[in-house]
Amino acid sequence: MKYFIVTYGCQMNVHESEKLAGILENIGYQPCEKREEADIIVFNTCAIREGAEDRVFGNVGNLKKLKKKNKNLIIAVCGCMTQKEDSAQKLLNTFPFVDIVLGTFNMTKLGYFIEAVKKGRQIEILDEGEIDEVLPYKRTSGDNAWVNIMQGCNNFCTYCIVPYVKGREKSRKEENILKEIKEILKEGKYKKITLLGQNVNSYGKDLNPEVSFSKLLKDICALDGDFTLSFMTSHPKDLTDDVIDTIAKEDKIEKYIHLPAQSGNNRILKLMNRKYTREKYLEIINKIRAKIPNCRITSDFIVGFPSETEEEFNDTLSLVEQVKYDSIFAFMFSSRSGTVAEKMDGQIPESEKKRRVNKLLALEKRLQKEANK
Ligand code: SAH
Ligand code: SF4
Ligand code: F3S
């Protein structure tokens, strides 16, 4: 029996797919190169922007023919998109040939649902769930091993669907994280460990007793072995001096911080509920640059947030120009149902968002060219 997994979205999803692969291999499935050869095709979806969802609809739709040819083919859709009510409904209605629909909190039950599918279509989407602690992962990222340290988000940035589809922040126990990393290092195949979380800086705040992210970093660095430690993503409001000092001091930690700013304008940052100002953000950047020479810094930006004026967009351009990032990701605001920003006045037309994103990307290109020179 063969499986094929299609993954959309962030690194966290890439890692979740490694979990799905582990589960499938445990029950006797083998990977295959082409969807045509598969007995089961799993879509691990993303809901962050409309474009991500559109790709899932296009690709699942394309399987209709395959399913006609092979009646025994199982098609499963799981991940963030299924937790978003309108998207899940649309999926279920448009694609009657999808056999299994699972949410983000119960993916590990895939094996059980494959068994049950003989009885008909299986759907289970839960509102919350515990964070998985011990699992077989089929690691697929070369000499980099992803390690999930937490899941969910409490920040509710007004544009973002993640808190709704991934639930509240839940941290894994430190001892379990350390145990997993020791096992990874023992295998001898991995040179890099990358810690994953929607907001790694708030790691451990929900544990009893609390564990800080900087303690976790130090404890991992103290493990024997020759490896580089990296992590993503940091929210600027929670990046403490302690974490910056730890990155500076520990040789094993990669000198790299992805620190999404989203906007360079204070009114927009407030509307986004980011809980920092441009000035505060720049203060953190200066601190990083002072304490960690040659630290690579990258960022995410959203253009065309509801009511963003040309002047406010210019503040984003000037922030990018000022910080001189190593690289940036620029996104056009995508309205997500159920979020606060969806209902805000002053939605910006698509053509204007496109113009702004192109302008931001052109600036980024110019700055990179200058830096490369
Ligand atoms: N937890 C991370 C971000 C995860 S989502 C953080 O807070 O930094 C990755 C990026 O997608 C975000 O940084 C943001 O720039 C972008 N994004 C999220 N929601 C979006 C939306 N509705 N429209 C456009 N871009 C969005
Ligand atoms: Fe989304 Fe904000 Fe949480 Fe990041 S911090 S996942 S952007 S709500
Ligand atoms: Fe997408 Fe879910 Fe990641 S919405 S960006 S796959 S957490």
Image (tube, grey):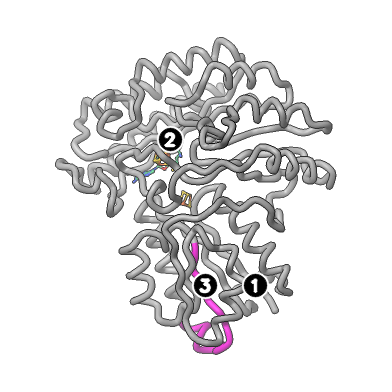
| Element type where label 2 sits in the image | strand
| Near-viewer residue (266 or 224) | 224
Q: Label 1: how many residues lie within 10 Å, few (<14), some (14-19) or many (20+)?
A: many
Determine whether the residue tagged by mark 1 lies in a helix, strand or loop: strand
Quarter occupied by the N terminus: bottom right
282 relative position to 40: left or right: left
Residue 112 is one of the magenta-drawn residues: no
Of the two numbered discs 1 and 2 in the rendering, the one whose residue sits closer to the viewer: 1
Q: Position of residue 235 (x, y in %)?
A: 46, 31
The amino acid beneath tag 2 is Asp
**344 horizontally vs 18: left or right:** left
- Foreground mark, 3 or 1? 3
Residue 280 pos. (x, y %): 38, 17
- The residue beneath circle 2 is 300
Which residue corresponds to mark 3? 76
Residue that badge 1 annotates: 3
Q: For the magenta stretch, what is the residue range? A: 64-78
Identify which amino acid the numbered label 1 is placed on: Tyr
The number of numbered badges drawn on the structure is 3
Residue toward you, 310 or 153? 153
Which of marks 1 and 3 precedes in the sequence?
1
| Circle 2 residues within 10 Å: few <14, some 14–19, many ≥20 | some
Is ligand 3 within 8 Å of the beta carbon of the residue shown at mark 1?
no
